[in-house]
Amino acid sequence: MRVSTMAVIRRGFAANKRGTVTSPLSFLSSSFHNLSHGNRPSSPKPRIDFSCLHEVDDAVFLFREMLRMRPQPSVVQFTKLLNVVVKMKQYGVALNAFDEMRQSGAPVNEYTLNIVVNCHCLLNRVDFGFAVLGSFFKCGYKPDVTTFTTLIKGLFLGDKVVEAEKLFKKLMTLKLCEPNEVTILTVINGLCKAGHTLTAYDLLRLFDKTSFKPNVKTYSTVIDSLCKDRMVDYALQLLATMIDKGISPDIVTYSSILRGLCNFGRWKEAKNLITEMVDHKICLDVVTFSILVDAFCKEGLVKEAEDVVEIMMQRNIFPNDVTYTTLIDGYSLVGQIDKARKVLDSMPGKGLKPSIISYSSLINGYCKNGKVEEAWGLFLEVPHKGLDYNVVTYNTMLQGLFCAGRCADGLKLFKDMHTHQLIPDVVTYNTLLNGLCMKKQIDEAFSFLHIMEEQGVNPDITTYGILIHGLCKDGKVEIARDLFNSLPCKGLRPNVQLYTIIIGSLCQEGHVEEAKCLLVEMEKSGCSPNSVTYNVCIQGLLKRKLFAEAKAFLNEMHRRGFSPDSTTVSLFLDQQQEEGLR
DNA sequence: GTAGGGTTAG
């Protein structure tokens, strides 16, 4: 094993304290290489090798040493080290280091300041990022295109889409700086991530008519977002456009399209795309292969997923923690939970550390396969593995407990979240509400609705779906309908699932005319009923023994090309049998 | 000789 350079540094430091080594540079010899004068330890311009830094403590240690060194390392060395800390995602640590630099008079330039702006942005404090603009001027520097690009990214990260767009326009109109391809990518990516894919698409086409030429990354971003928004055909069109304009798609572009095709079962086109990639000499990498593993797993085709893993290993492309986590999901989905466990257990032997996502996946697998105790055991292991819980881990475990009917345990776990500095999100509350509604604790569920609103977590359409479903199942269809009707005032548009719940309940309660009206209304709002809608309605009507109505719905269902499911069919058969007996 | 950028997962 390679001896850690930092261990050497540490040993050297201890020796220095004992006074056995005198030169401040000599104990850092494995990190410092003299530029052109061989290994003279007192060379005034040491080149520092930062690549051996893997722990933030080591970086901070080296940083403090650099502050003490005379002559002082250059601003470039400080900038590089700060960036190492940023790459470790230790933004707060980087900011503290910067403060220490200022206090001890270390050199600072626009590069350093840009890193500081970036750290504030990544900590979701774009306001502090803007405040750094003052430091620029104080130090005699001007914010440049990197500064403004970083601030735009910061605004997007803080969901300040309008402000981000404004800042970008200001750059152009006030000529604060010339936007470059990173700026354009940042704006386009921000719009996509904020859910404004079509705006991004239009902007991309607009840029293409100007001198600001979007590059392959920008095209890929929009293509990926189109695929995620189910507009795979638009994505394919854009792929053709970029090729037309002479911009070669790369592995990322193809991977996005591949995922889009797989997600919508367009296997044949996916296969053709892979052929096209090979033709273009683009080698499939671990991400591409993982996308294929994921696609097969989602279809429950774990054997095929295993084959993909086999193929990639044959090509010396080694599955990473994401690949294996995907496989854990696949095995969980098809109920092969022991295999899922084996995957997790095998990871350390392959030199891979399971992530919190790997653990969450297996916890989810245990829960979905009715093994809540095992899930709980694994959940408790998380801190001992040096991993931090996240909201999803909690949400998964909560879901497991509530599904198993263990409301009290679920509520206890929910209250425990803050001890890990985790803030419940809308999924957490939805899980809680659903658990309570399933136990017909509707009042309790509504009190949590108020708690979430107080905590600033906005209920979404799922939240109301859960409550409306709960009310319907509890026979409170009138209240459910009122709540349903209040949704537009809250800025929420009912989706197919929600319409299905309410229309199905109306059928079951015998309010057939009202159900029919809502069916018309839902179509008017651009929401088409699906096979589930009809099945639920028919089943409700049959339970009410409204046969003629049920048959009318069945006819309509057939007319639209849907087929009744097995429950609907057997209810009809029971019905006919009953009629025959009479 | 330094800073800002696109794809995979629960």
Image (cartoon, coloured by chain):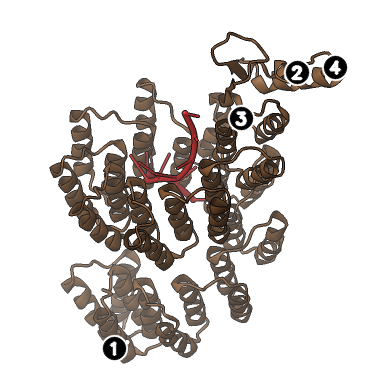
Disc 4 versus disc 3: distance between alpha carbons? 28 Å
Q: Amino acid at mark 3?
A: His
N-terminal of the pair, mark 3 or mark 2, is: 2
Disc 2 versus disc 4: distance between alpha carbons? 10 Å
Please tell me the colour of chain A.
Answer: brown
Q: Mark 1 near mark 3, Cβ–Cβ under 8 Å?
A: no
Kindly indicate whether the residues beneath marks 1 and 3 are on one polypeptide chain: yes
Disc 3 versus disc 2: distance between alpha carbons? 18 Å
Q: Is residue A285 above or below residue A8?
A: below
Label 2 belongs to which residue? Answer: A12
**x, y percentage for residue A474?**
53, 82
**x, y percentage for residue A226?**
28, 55
Kindly indicate whether the residues beneath marks 2 and 1 are on one polypeptide chain: yes
Q: Secondary structure at mark 2?
A: helix
Q: Residues within 10 Å of mark 1 (few under 14, many from 20)?
A: few
Q: Secondary structure at mark 4?
A: loop
Kindly indicate whether the residues beneath marks 2 and 4 are on one polypeptide chain: yes
Q: Amino acid at mark 2?
A: Gly
- Quadrant including the N terminus of chain A: top right
Q: Residue furthest left?
A: A244
What number is the disc on residue A54? Answer: 3
Q: Which chain is red?
A: B
Viewed as shown, does residue A176 lie left or right of A133? left
Label 1 belongs to which residue? Answer: A517
Determine the image quadrant of residue A69: top right
Query: Is residue A121 something one can see in this rendering?
Result: yes
N-terminal of the pair, mark 1 or mark 3, is: 3
Q: Residue furthest front?
A: A140
**x, y percentage for residue A38?**
58, 8
